[in-house]
Image (tube, grey):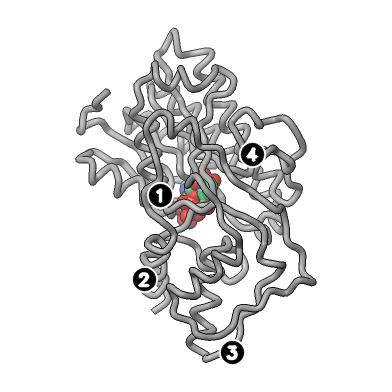
Amino acid sequence: MSINKNTKIYVAGHRGMVGSAIVRQLQAKGFTNIVTRTHAELDLTNQHAVQTFFQEERPGQVYLAAAKVGGIHANNTYPAEFIYQNLMMEANVVHHAFQAGVKKLLFLGSSCIYPKMAPQPMAEDALLTGKLEATNEPYAIAKIAGIKLCESYNRQYSQSHGVDYRSVMPTNIYGPGDNYHPENSHVIPALIRRFHEAKEKNLPEVVIWGTGTPMREFLYVDDMAAASVFVMELDKAVYDQHTQPMQSHINVGFGSDMTIKELAETVCQVVGYQGQIIFDNSKPDGTPKKLMNSASINEMGWYAKVGLPDGLAVAYQDFLRITN
Ligand SMILES: NC(=O)c1ccc[n+]([C@@H]2O[C@H](COP(=O)([O-])OP(=O)(O)OC[C@H]3O[C@@H](n4cnc5c(N)ncnc54)[C@H](OP(=O)(O)O)[C@@H]3O)[C@@H](O)[C@H]2O)c1
């Protein structure tokens, strides 16, 4: 189904890594009427402000890529902020989008919605089948609530109001616009920073926690943005065929995983660090494997395109631009 290129589209979180890639993707596809607000202009946890915004702007579509996001350290240190802010943003945006007549909305979740011991690769039907990873449980609960918000509005209002709110669950994302904070970042930006600093200081080795054997999956952010627009534009009959009213989310993964050792070696190569990589076996490893089952989105016709070395090369240039 082709969508009018003048449709007014609100991208929430447009200055974030994923939101900015969605804006790039929409612009590349010729969409000309993209509405944005910075966090300072519109605090999405503020119900009244969100209501006023939607009543004034009345967008035709919404991408909800705003969230409070962080690594293990941030999730463990600020659990109250993670659950409260994410629940508020989702509830405010979904409800006031509905009230303003928005028919199409895409909610971005995360692979951490799945139980810690979910069978690998994790398929959509693993949701709510077991206990979550404790460190990011508050964040995951908020993301699960986001999926259920979209589903509930669909179930109650799709017939009467034509509501069609969809959800995508990305694996680990990396690329330009990432967060390189020394403590609050995810594994790829953290490794980029560490190898870069080791190169600058001519350090003989970089020590990485654990054995390097855990396996993880990584998706380049422009692939994620393409998947987001793809799912938003999917014909409703096709989306409905691959989902159920109470299991409506779609996984978005690269399709294969790699060891942390392979990841570290690739980052090391891209950064051009010449020293040794040492794995400290005395430190904990975390879950041995975390891979999404992306069969559903693949069957609908979307595949990731950007391999890790190419994606990392762009990410490293972005890191150099931000830090210089
Ligand atoms: N990064 C990943 O690996 C990954 C993996 C899976 C899923 N996701 C999902 O993808 C989405 C986007 O993640 P991201 O990595 O792009 O995060 P990000 O770079 O931190 O971007 C999030 C954006 O949301 C904005 N925001 C946060 N709180 C807000 C508020 N109260 N009001 C208005 N704006 C607010 C932030 O603005 P400020 O910075 O000004 O606060 C920021 O621009 C999230 O839903 C996340 O769960 C990300």
Q: Quick check: is the Cβ at mark 3 less than 8 Å away from ligand 1? A: no
In the rendered view, does 64 fall on the left or right side of 58?
A: right
Q: Quick one: quadrant of the C terminus?
A: bottom left
54 above or below 313?
above
Q: Nearer the viewer, mark 3 or mark 2?
A: 3
Q: Residue at x 48, y 40 (%)?
A: 252
SS at mark 3 in the image: loop
Residue 5, given in percent of the width and then of the height, sits at 20, 33
Near mark 2 (Cα within 10 A), the count class, few <14, some 14-19 or many ≥20, is: some
Q: Which residue is mark 4?
A: 113
Residue 91, given in percent of the width and then of the height, sits at 55, 32
Q: Mark 4: which amino acid? A: Ile
Closer to the N terminus: mark 1 or mark 2? 1
Q: Which mark is residue 289?
A: none
Alpha carbon of mark 1 to alpha carbon of mark 3: how far? 46 Å
Q: Which residue is mark 1?
A: 41
Residue furthest out toward the right? 282
Residue 209, given in percent of the width and then of the height, sits at 70, 70
In the rendered view, does 276 fall on the left or right side of 61?
A: right
Q: Residues at badges 1 and 2 in contact (C-beta under 8 Å)?
A: no
Q: Which residue is mark 3?
A: 204
Q: Nearer the viewer, mark 1 or mark 4?
A: 4
Q: Mark 3: which amino acid? A: Pro
Q: Which residue is mark 2?
A: 317
Q: Nearer the viewer, mark 1 or mark 3?
A: 3
Q: Residue at x 62, y 58 (%)?
A: 71
